[in-house]
Image (cartoon, rainbow, N blue to C red):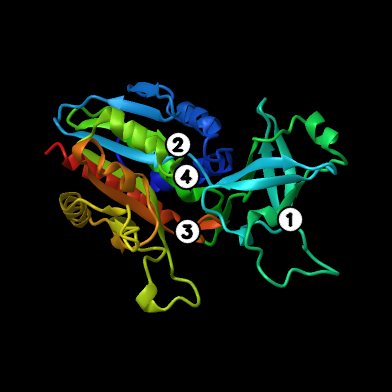
Amino acid sequence: MEFNRKNTEKEFRERIVGLSGVFGPSGFEDEVANLIKEHLKGVDYEISSDVMGNLIFHKKGKGKTKVLISAHMDEIGLIIRHIDSKGFLWVDTLGGIAPQQFFGKHVIIRTEEGKHIDGIINSLHPGRPDRCHTMPESVHEFFIEVGADSKQDVIDMGIEVGNAVSIDYPVIFLGNHRIGGKALDDRAFVFILEELVKLLDDKDNIPDFYAVFSVQEEVGARGAIVAASNIQPDIAIALDMSLATDIPGVPDAECVNALGEGASIKVMDKLGTGIGGLLSNREVVSQMKKTAKENNIPYCIEAYAAGATDASFMQTLNGGIKAGGLQTPMRYVHSYEVADVRDVVATLELLYRYVLSLSE
């Protein structure tokens, strides 16, 4: 299989609807993993999973370098912490999500048996006569309505404390090139990694390649830490979103990236606190930039002292790993996320060409 920009864009538009829509809050990624296995049925890889739930595709190439590429399967979400006597559900967060994302949203609760149940999340003061004039500071000011009259009604539906909840944003196509949806962070990159697996399927002259569809990134990259500790790669690249700040009210001096700029090569993240975060390996960054220029692939740079990815946590494992990140600019992180399809295609092309370059 060879890379084709037009075909890649078509495939992305077709598959992202299912990838975005599938249920997968942190710690509950099994439906995502099953969909990936369906998409990659028939590839000639060693396929495995570990105790955390990471889904790993391994292809032994001829190169000596061991390369791990990760894309996380999980999305930010909620978890039920209490069911009250009137049948309302009270929740806590799974990952970084702000209260302003909760008002009047459609949510999906998954029961232990795998049944999906619709609900609506709202605040203690959603409207007249006692309007909410200030933003609630805590998720504890919100509850979920599932149409129950009592706690027993909720139990009879199969809902219980500990069930995960996904906030539903259906995929929409905006204009000629943009897409909005739930969990584009990181399902757009799940698509990219799926495509990379297929592109390398018939290649022999490649590095020792591990595609890791990781779990629990949104709550501390727990899956990637375990996978990288077990695999012990020479190079680890995390696929994730980069902030597109080209929106009203953001001054030029605070711009990170913009939609339509192409792939985003990460230089640093979360270094503002001096604790954790990533300074990408300089060789990795240089090789990615060189590859982009040689193949006329549009790219930008992310140097942003906030956020973190799987790479931020893998870099210091096993005595040190050459780590970096390849990203796509996105607006409205952890909300109704928006990406440019052309940037997704550019990110896949740069990733593919970069991996091939490691065998030269």
Task: In this rendered view, identify the residue nearer to me: 141 or 239.
Answer: 141
Q: Amino acid at mark 3?
A: His
Where, quadrant-wise, is the N terminus in this rendering?
top left
- Which residue matches tag 2? 215
- Which residue matches tag 1? 122
In primary-sequence order, the first of circles 4 and 1 is 1
Q: Left of 62 or right of it: where is 31?
A: right
Identified at 77% across, 62% down, the residue is 126
Q: Is residue 93 above or below residue 114?
A: below
Q: Closer to us: mark 4 or mark 3? A: 4
Q: Are marks 4 and 1 in contact (CB under 8 Å)?
A: no
Q: Closer to us: mark 2 or mark 3? A: 2
Q: Gap between marks 4 and 1, in whole Å?
A: 24 Å
- Which residue matches tag 3? 177
Q: Closer to us: mark 3 or mark 1? A: 1
Identified at 40% across, 44% down, the residue is 8
- Specify the farthest residue to the left: 360
